[in-house]
Amino acid sequence: MALYSADSKEQVRDAVDMVDLVSARTELRRAGASSFQGLCPFHEERTPSFSVDPVKKVYHCFGCGAGGDVFRFVMETEGADFPAALELLADRYGVALEREEEDPQAAARRERRERIYRLLARTADYYARYLWSSEEAREAREYLVSRGLEEETLRTFRVGYAPSAWDHMLVRSRRAGFSDDELRAAGLAQRSAKTSGLYDRFRERIMFPLTDLRGRVVGFGARAMRDNQQPKYLNTAEGEVYHKGRQLFGADQARADAAKAGEVVLVEGYTDVLAMHQAGLRNTVGLMGTALTEDQLTELARMAPRVALALDADASGQEAMVRAARLAEGRSLELRVVALPPGGDPAELVQAEGADAMRERVAASAPFARFHVERILAAANVGTADGRDRALDQLRGVLSALAPSALRDELVRMVAGRLALSEQVVSSLASSPALAGAAPAASRPRAALDRREELERTFLALCIAQPEPGREALRNVDLDQHFTSPLARRAAAHLRDHVAAPLEGVAGDDAELLSLLAELVLRGDRDPGDRHTLEVQTLQLEKARLEREIASARAEGRLDVADLAAERTRVKERLDTALDRVMEEGSGG
């Protein structure tokens, strides 16, 4: 794990435009002098409960409890760990990161990975130059043009061509100082079974660089140029930086557009992605002809809350859509299906029908449930009672998962008409409730705080809103005695030294503390109070402590109950006086 200096972290935090960062995921509107509000990107809601403080650079949802700082936001939305989130933000906002000292083994591992990334980037650049400059690649250029792809699009995706010589990249890379071990680790060279010598893995192929979310090349997808060249598509082998099951082609290019559109379009092949981007559908990513994996679906869900499946209308494409639905069960993710004619892929359709027609197809995508019902009905033997029963059995799971809606009613009518059954019979299939517990945890309202937790959080929020008196108030409380919540106690201990900059010094992977501090900052923004309000809350905290102590003393049969009760009376008198002062100032008196 890369370690960066605390100064680097703070420089990145200072450089981030919090509203710009969050607006890529949800529309924000100003909700006060120092805050913005919008619909929460982490759970479904109709009334905004998601708040952002652009100055302190924190976010919190008062509905589901999600919250944190700029780094936590990227970790949650991009599925990155803290160092990766820091690096992503540093790249985006142009901040140079400084590393802390590493132990020699960690430094060696990091240097090795960085050399592999440099080798892959260097190779991708060479392949791209070779495509446009060499006579050998002329046929490849003609093929790409014949697919309707423009030079600008091909250059944007760094499409290239691998020379036919068996050791072309091997020789060039060795001359540049890269070792044979690094060439194998990068997936660029492989060993001959006959001679044990190394040779280029990719030869005489169109090269599509595969990148991570930061745009770093991690491998290649390669298309053969000859009919007798097998396999037709060859990918980088699993290795130190390339993991096939996690990859979505074009995700780095599509991420921002998908977030803004609230939808990501999924296609199968490389040229499909390029054609869709060229048609203005820049929120498109590709499966690269592989079966959809859990990791890929997780990445799709991070990109947008809705996925439009524009997969080929053949058996494998339809099965891929059904698999996507199975993997999506229990997620807050809407699947839709883009209707494509049999035998046509997106690249061919863009070329034949034009960009406008493809955009219309995507805009007219249908809910996955309708596609699934139609698929089951199309395959059913509706001429026999046994065939209709089998179809009904398959449809049961589809219909019962739908909440009462116009869509469910429409599908019930469709099924009844096609199977020659009454709507009442079909409706009985949909009578069971939607799958219990299917909603992800983040979509459920968080549990209400108990009175003690509410009291402790309100006190801490006021301390943040009023740093000077807040610092003094934090010094005067006993962390063990005044705080019943371990998390609130941790927050109070941290704020004693950081009340003016609440998130400073918090470990990037301490999600629980980050979330609470973000909530406290935004609570303070909403209701900053004044020094008298803080005094009231401090006395409330002391009164609650004494009441707990009295209850404990009585349970243990201690003799100091009367003294504690007298002390509570004195605190209550001071509390009443402080409350009167707040009321007087509030009424202008």
Image (cartoon, rainbow, N blue to C red):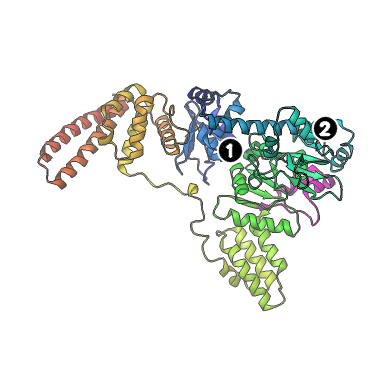
Q: Is residue 532 visible?
A: no
- Was residue 354 drawn as part of the magenta stretch in this picture? yes
**As displayed, is residue 227 above or below residue 488?**
below
Residue 332 point in image, percent of width and height: 55, 50
The amino acid beneath tag 1 is: Arg
Q: As drawn, is 228 to the left or to the right of 567? A: right
Label 1 element class: loop
Numbered circle sitting on residue 585:
none
Most foreground residue, 194 or 398: 194
Numbered circle sitting on residue 25:
1
Residue at image mark 2: 130
Most foreground residue, 464 or 126: 126
Image quarter (top left, top right, bottom left or bottom right) of the C terminus: top left
Residue 354 point in image, percent of width and height: 82, 44
**As displayed, is residue 388 above or below residue 297?**
below
Q: Residue 513: name its quadrant.
A: top left
Magenta residues span 336-363
Task: First in sequence, mark 1 or 2: give its number.
Answer: 1
Residue at left offset 81%, top offset 55%: 343
Q: Can residue 518 be seen in this view?
A: yes
- Was residue 453 drawn as part of the magenta stretch in this picture? no
